[in-house]
Amino acid sequence: MRINNLWFFLISAVSISGQAQPTLIKESPTSNLGVVWNLETIYSEISGLTAINTGNNTPTFLAIQDGGNATEIMVCRWVERKIEGIKVPLVNSDWEAIVVDSSRVYLGDFGNNRGNRKDLKIYRCLGIPSNFNNVGDLSQALADNHNWDSIQFNFPDQANFSPRFRHNFDCEAMLVRGDSIWLFTKNWRNFRSQIYLLENKPGRQVALPVAELKPRCLVTDACWVNGGAVLLGYSVLGNQFIMNVDWAKKRISKKRKLAIKPAQMEGVAFNPGNNKIYVSTEKRKTQQAAIIELCGN
């Protein structure tokens, strides 16, 4: 992004701060888990999760796995307990987030555990059907190389690209609204999260720092909930958290512990049809990879 594009930044900042905050997440320190869908053994994790419109209120998700796994987008049908994989013509360096809006699918290939990546990007797919219920049409759109473009970006405040563990330039969470893409870093060094802003258009950009949040955990995903933002994260002790973001004050306004440990929550999605939040977790020795419905909302 060109820093002199001041109007874009000002308009985006004002519109996002003026949005109503979600009401689903209560002050209760612990959230009980609802229905758990244990996934097939071939899926070791879901690193990104988003709910899609299928023309009815039943939850259906698009999901991805991270680097080292197939270049595949999974259609996960909650009621049928059915997963359909769609092969896409992309490279999976480290996919960590998937988002949809009214016209595109976005894949965040920006996982950066060691802090040494210089090829951070967001893939965008155009030409998707407005109703995702027809998996055949969706598969055709996602499999067509001509429908994809990408945003390549870098963090302007990163100067050290030597492989290391404790750094603040990993990223696993993304939100999209209109002309703006918001990134939330996963800070291994200070357990905070920097918000960066990108323009929603293809090409090379420099991410614009906007604010710093203090979640006191490692942020792994984000979703919109009733006009506001919700973040997911975990601590190094294995605790899992879901958090509201107060955009006006640029802070975590509510934080709730999920009643599952040990685990590593990687995906969060909101299904407006039934007003429910869903989270996904990696496979562990004591549990399968799963998509979990939160209750007590």
Image (tube, rainbow, N blue to C red):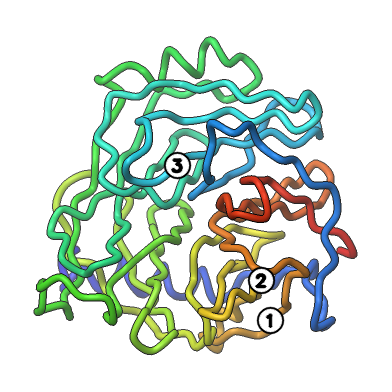
Helix, strand or loop at label 3? It is: loop
Amino acid type, label 1: Lys
- Confirm or deny contact between disc 2 and disc 1 (CB under 8 A): yes
Who is closer to the viewer here, 254 or 234?
234
What is the residue that sits farthest to the right in this orientation?
296
In this image, 183 relative to 154: left or right?
Answer: right
Which residue is at a point 28% across and 29% down the rendered structure image? Answer: 148
Q: Secondary structure at mark 1?
A: strand
How dense is the environment of label 2, judged by Cα within 10 Å: few (below 14), some, or many (20 and up)?
A: many
Gap between marks 2 and 3, in whole Å?
Answer: 21 Å
Q: Position of residue 118 (x, y in %)?
A: 12, 59
Rendered location of residue 124, percent (x, y): 34, 38
Res. 101 in view: no
**Circle 1 is placed at which residue position?**
255
Where residue 207 appears, as percent x and y from the top left, is: 24, 67
Whether residue 121 is visible, yes or no, is yes
Instruction: Assign a secondary structure to mark 2.
Output: strand
Residue at image point 68% right, 81% down: 255
Q: Tag 2: residue type?
A: Ile
The x and y percentages for residue 257 are: 72, 76
Location of the C terminus (image quadrant) = bottom right
Nearest the camera: 139 or 237? Answer: 237
- Give the residue number, with chain letter if any, for mark 3: 65
Q: CA distance from mark 3 to mark 1?
A: 26 Å
**Does the CB distance between marks 3 and 1 fall below 8 Å?**
no
For the residue pair 167 and 140, the one nearer the viewer reads as 167
Mark 2, residue position: 242
Q: Quadrant of the N terminus?
A: bottom left
Q: Count up the numbered dots.
A: 3
Q: On the image, which quarter does residue 222 sit in?
A: bottom right
In screen coordinates, is 137 left or right of 292? left
Q: Earlier in the sequence, mark 3 or mark 1?
A: 3
